[in-house]
Image (cartoon, helix red, strand yellow):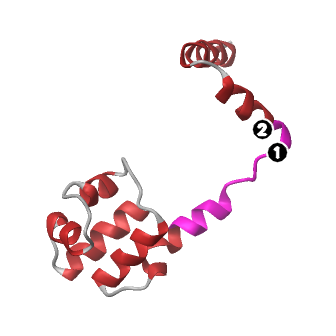
């Protein structure tokens, strides 16, 4: 996972989260958020991190790419359901999820 690789490589390079954030010009909490898995950086930022840590981009993301390859592609029907769900209000999305949960429990 990216968050684990980032922490390992950051610590190996001898940087604190704050030091790495400053080195790549990001907000102080950015690295902490990435390592916690609550946020993920974009590709350009991943490139900047790799340069700062003196590693290849693939060192940070190879296992992420492998994991994504294991995820089955969405069918057209899956995509249609997602698009319809996204058009619902937040309240109706919650109701729909509750309905789905109740159907699964049966």
Residue 36 horizontal side relative to residue 56, left or right: left
Q: Which residues are magenta?
A: 64-78
- Residue lying furthest front: 25
In this view of the protein, which residue sits in the foreground, 104 or 62?
62
| Residue 68 shown in magenta | yes
Q: Residue at x 71, y 34 (%)?
A: 82
**Residue 27 marker:** none
Q: In which quadrant is the C terminus drawn?
A: top right
Residues marked 2 and 1 touching at CB (< 8 Å)? yes
Q: Is residue 22 above or below residue 56?
A: above
Residue 17 horizontal side relative to residue 37, left or right: left
Neighbour tally class for label 1: few under 14, some 14-19, many 20 plus, Cα within 10 Å: few
- For marks 2 and 1, give the CA distance: 5 Å
Give the prevailing secondary structure in the magenta stretch: helix
Total tally of numbered discs in the picture: 2
The quarter of the picture where residue 77 lies is top right
In this view of the protein, which residue sits in the foreground, 37 or 52?
52
- Residue lying furthest right: 76
Q: Residue at x 68, y 25 (%)?
A: 87
Residue 61 horizontal side relative to residue 11, left or right: right
Residue 25 locus on image (x, y percent) = 25, 69
Q: Please give the residue where the numbered disc 2 appears in the rendered image.
A: 78
| Residue 13 shown in magenta | no
Residue 36 locus on image (x, y percent) = 31, 51
Q: Please give the residue where the numbered disc 1 appears in the rendered image.
A: 75
The quarter of the picture where residue 66 lies is bottom right
Residue 10 locus on image (x, y percent) = 25, 74
Q: Residue at x 49, y 80 (%)?
A: 58
Q: In which quadrant is the N terminus drawn?
A: bottom left
């Amino acid at each position: 996972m990216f968050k684990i690789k980032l922490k390992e490589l950051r610590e190996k390079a001898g940087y604190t989260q704050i030091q790495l954030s400053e080195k790549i010009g990001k907000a102080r909490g950015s690295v902490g958020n990435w390592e916690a898995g609550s946020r993920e950086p974009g590709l350009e930022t991943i490139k900047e991190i790799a340069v700062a840590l003196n590693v290849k981009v693939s060192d940070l993301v190879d296992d992420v790419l492998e994991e994504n390859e294991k995820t089955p592609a969405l069918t057209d029907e899956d995509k249609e359901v997602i698009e319809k769900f996204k058009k619902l209000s937040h309240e109706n999305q919650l109701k729909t999820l509750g309905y789905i949960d109740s159907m699964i429990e049966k």
